[in-house]
Amino acid sequence: MLNAIVFYRISRWLYLHHIPFLPKLVTLLIFLIYNSKIPYQAKIGKGTKFGYGGMGVVIHSKAVVTKPVPDNAIVAGVPAKILRFKNENGDS
């Protein structure tokens, strides 16, 4: 089943094997299909699942998300806590 995580893992593999340009292309494909930004430089552990919902959520690096995150929230920390909410224009 192709989902955002599968495409991320492909882009991550390409990045780790120093294959130029293709990781960026796959990351763009993820954005176009799933409207999500998952950088190939990010390390996402095995067994990770992305739930649907949480429109406009920003999760900072090294955050450990253990609970649902509301729309437009910016979260960080271990465990992840809401830092603030983005306004309607998408600005923080």
Image: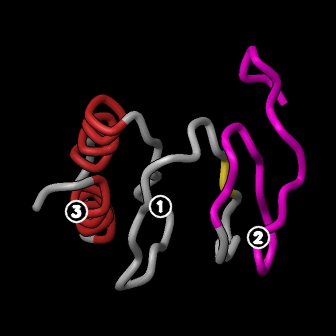
Give the farthest residue toward the top.
89
* Distance (Cα) linking label 1 and label 3: 15 Å
Which mark is nearer the camera, 3 or 2? Answer: 2
In the displayed structure image, the side of residue 2 where residue 74 appears, left or right: right
Looking at the image, which residue is at 47% across and 43% down?
Answer: 37
Q: Nearer the viewer, mark 1 or mark 3?
A: 3
Q: Left of 81 or right of it: where is 3?
A: left
The percent coordinates of residue 76 (x first, y second) are: 79, 63
Part of the protein shown in magenta: 68-92
- Tell me, for residue 41, which label it has, or none: 1
Q: Tell me where residue 42 appears, x and y as whole percent.
A: 50, 64
Q: Quadrant of residue 7?
A: bottom left
Q: Quadrant of residue 18?
A: bottom left
Q: Which residue is mark 3?
A: 6
The residue depicted at 31 percent of the width and 62 percent of the height is 5
In which quadrant will I find the C terminus? top right
Q: Secondary structure at mark 3?
A: helix
Q: Residue at x 77, y 79 (%)?
A: 79
Marks 1/3 in contact by CB < 8 Å: the verdict is no
Residue 4 vs 44, above or below: the answer is above
- Label 1 secondary element: loop
Residue type at mark 1: give it.
Answer: Gln
Q: What label does residue 80 carry, if any?
A: 2
**Mark 2 or mark 3, which is nearer the start of the sequence?**
3
